[in-house]
Image: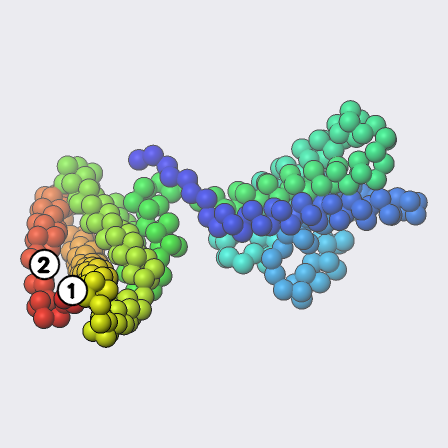
Amino acid sequence: MPLSVQLQEREDFEVRTLRALGGGVAAGLLAVAASRLHVHVDAGFFAVAGAALSGARTDWKVRVGMLVGFPVLLNLPDMLYVPAPLSDACMGALAAGVVGWLGTQWKPKPLQVLAGAVGAGALVPLGLYVKTVMDARLFDGRLGALGAVLGLAAVALFWGVGMLAAHVTVHGNAVEARGTALEKQLSGEARGLVSRALTLYLQCRKEAARLTAGPGKTELVGVLEKMAREVFTLAETHAELEAQLQAVQQGDVDAQVKELRAKAAAATDSVARRQLELAASSLGEELNHLDILGRKRERLLAQLHAQVALLERARVSLVGVQGGDVASKGAQAAQLARKLAALGQEDSGAPAPAPLPDSTKVVG
């Protein structure tokens, strides 16, 4: 199955990268001031420290701790006599690791923090090389402070872009990738059901992986994927209906209908009365449409519960299959796949609830 690559928390990455770039500019100004005071300046340290301090999205206490700890932490590679450019890469990786672990509004996994540290560390030497080329070919000492600021800003930008690796997730299963992405988009009860369905699907996959390879196992895995996809499709449709209903306040429409009818009843001119009645009738139809959407949303939520329960039943059944002997597991898997498929068809083919009586509708 092809790999699925997703970018998580893109807004966090964009904001942090821009802030890191601003930190590089501030570090460049500070480095210029230090050089004019004849103080030795480590361009890599200033750029990385400035980018990390500015890019970290955390409270002031953690930021102060980073400010105090960075002079020691980022100079560890030099203290251990690590040769360049490996020392520059280690410095960038250490700063990215701290920011990934403490300076983000979302909580990346340890492997994502490690990936961001490796990516940022790998790009710091490249950023320093670009700075050297810019100094030699473009600035050549002519732009003075501006050249130094642009050079350190370039290093900070490379460091920030390298942390993109912390936002990348790779899934070997397209169904799992879809569920993970959908879970982050939803809220409320639907999100809880999708989260539960995703957990059950992963558990079912784990149990199915223990079965002997064969047509029965392949059929069973396909049925499980279909069941999970149906949950996600229902959740997406429910989210669309939820957005439509939230865009219009049903109480406001109902109040407008009553107001128009009151004005129509009070109107003395027949033409004006007819226009007001038509307007009230039109809004009444909109109110009926909202009522239909609301009932459809309830049905979708009920179907979501039923489909998640079906996945729960599949998980329990798979545990039962594991208790059989190896020779019969393939046949049991095929039989279970057909049973689950039949249950899914019965659930999807269930009759829809009868519409509400006409007396509850708004009549134009």
Of callouts 2 and 1, which one flags the residue occurring earlier in the amino acid sequence?
2
Res 209 → quadrant: top left
Q: With respect to residue 43, does 308 lie above or below?
A: below
Residue 352, numbered label: 2
**Residue ID at (33%, 46%):** 178
Left or right of 43? Residue 231 is left
Left or right of 113? Residue 271 is left
Query: x, y percentage for residue 181?
Result: 37, 49
**Amino acid at the residue labelled 2:** Ala
**Residue ID at (34%, 51%):** 182
The answer to whether mark 2 and mark 1 are in CB contact below 8 A is no
**Near-viewer residue (188 or 163):** 188
**Residue ID at (7%, 63%):** 354
Q: With respect to residue 310, does 42 lie above or below?
A: above
Secondary structure of residue under mark 2: loop
Res 284 → quadrant: bottom left
> Marks 2 and 1, Cα distance to the nearest angstrom?
27 Å
Query: x, y percentage for residue 50?
Result: 72, 50
Query: x, y percentage for residue 60?
Result: 67, 65
Residue that badge 1 annotates: 364
How packed mark 2 is, by other alpha carbons closer than 10 Å (few <14, some 14-19, many 20 or more), is: few
Res 316 → quadrant: bottom left
Point out the image quarter for the C terminus.
bottom left
